[in-house]
């Protein structure tokens, strides 16, 4: 997955404004997590003279998979670009309108009431709701999201949450127009067999998916061109990859 991201980024390399010092700024906002990417047990060979990057992951604590995927990807960014830093930011909780800014609290309730969860998911996954939510969220929060992203100054934005695709895509496009520097945004879908339609924003550089089923949904529901979709599997911790390789060598 990471090599595909890097290949997609390479064409805009000269436009990056990333820091070479790899330092984080202090951030006490409870909805953000600013961390130097963890290098523990990571042995991926980095290329000399590669510039460190500021990576902004858009996610929310609605289940552990989103944060885990972001952390796994962050480790690889650091391995490929030593000194890179990353931040996790929940833009919906920070800048979203009701009911979306209650996402974390609502998720905890719905996860304990599966029948309610099924109803909410089914209604929100319709084409009519998708169109309504798209207009509502963009009009209510795009400016705030754009300002927040610009303040954080990332070199690349990666969404690992379905509610953080449509607005960030528009915000990054507007930032590119305002600054004259291309700000790439990618989506990594963390679902395997089925996925909510709001994952599939067409304006991303690449959409990384884990199965043919998700690829089909992206093309059908999101009208994402096939050339933008990358079959990559799900992000896993580097430690698991190393262990799997070692086990394979013993057989």
Image: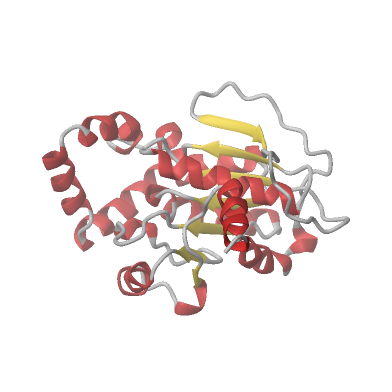
Q: Quadrant of residue 117?
A: top left
Where residue 19 appears, as percent x and y from the top left, is 79, 43
Q: Quadrant of residue 241?
A: bottom right
Q: How is the image coloured?
A: secondary structure
x then y, percent, for residue 139: 38, 48
**From this viewpoint, which residue is outermost toward the top?**
28
Q: Residue at x 63, y 43 (%)?
A: 150
Q: Residue at x 68, y 69 (%)?
A: 7
Placement of 63 over or under 187, stated as above or below: above
Q: Is residue 82 left or right of residue 218?
A: right
- Could you say which is closer to the camera, residue 210 or residue 44? 44
Quarter of the image where the N terminus is located: bottom right
Above or below — where is 34 with respect to 71? above
Query: Can you give x and y, in whole percent of width and height, for residue 172 in the image?
Result: 56, 54
Whether residue 210 is visible here, answered yes or no, is yes
Query: Is residue 173 shown to the viewer in this render?
Result: no
| Quadrant in the picture for the C terminus | bottom right
Q: In the image, 64: left or right of 240?
A: left
Residue under the image location 47 percent in, 39 percent down: 91
Q: Residue furthest right?
A: 49
- Counting labels gives 0
Expressed as whole percent of the image width and height from the top left, the position of residue 231 reads 48, 70
215 or 169: which is nearer to us? 215
Residue at the image point whose x is 39% and y is 68% from the top: 211
């Amino acid at each position: 997955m990471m090599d595909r991201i890097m290949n997609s980024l390479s064409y805009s390399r000269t436009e990056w404004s990333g820091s070479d010092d790899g330092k984080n700024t202090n951030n006490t906002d409870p909805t953000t997590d600013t961390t130097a990417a963890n290098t523990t047990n990571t042995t991926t060979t980095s290329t000399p003279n590669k510039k460190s990057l500021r990576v902004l992951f858009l996610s929310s604590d609605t289940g552990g998979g989103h944060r885990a995927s972001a952390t796994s990807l962050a480790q690889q960014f650091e391995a490929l670009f030593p000194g890179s830093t990353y931040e996790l930011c929940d833009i919906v909780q920070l800048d979203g309108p009701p009911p979306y800014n209650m996402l974390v609290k609502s998720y905890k309730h719905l996860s304990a009431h599966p029948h309610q969860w099924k109803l909410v998911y089914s209604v929100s996954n319709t084409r009519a709701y998708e169109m309504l939510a798209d207009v509502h969220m963009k009009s209510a929060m795009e400016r705030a999201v754009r300002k927040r992203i610009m303040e954080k100054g990332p070199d690349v934005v990666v969404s690992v949450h379905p509610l953080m695709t449509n607005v960030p895509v528009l915000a990054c496009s507007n930032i590119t127009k305002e600054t004259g520097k291309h700000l790439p945004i990618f989506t990594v879908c963390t679902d395997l067999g089925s996925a909510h339609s709001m994952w599939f924003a067409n304006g991303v550089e690449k959409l990384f998916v884990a199965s043919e089923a998700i690829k089909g949904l992206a093309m059908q529901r999101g009208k994402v061109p096939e050339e933008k979709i990358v079959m990559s599997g799900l992000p896993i911790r580097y430690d698991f990859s190393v262990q799997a390789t070692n086990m394979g060598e013993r057989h």
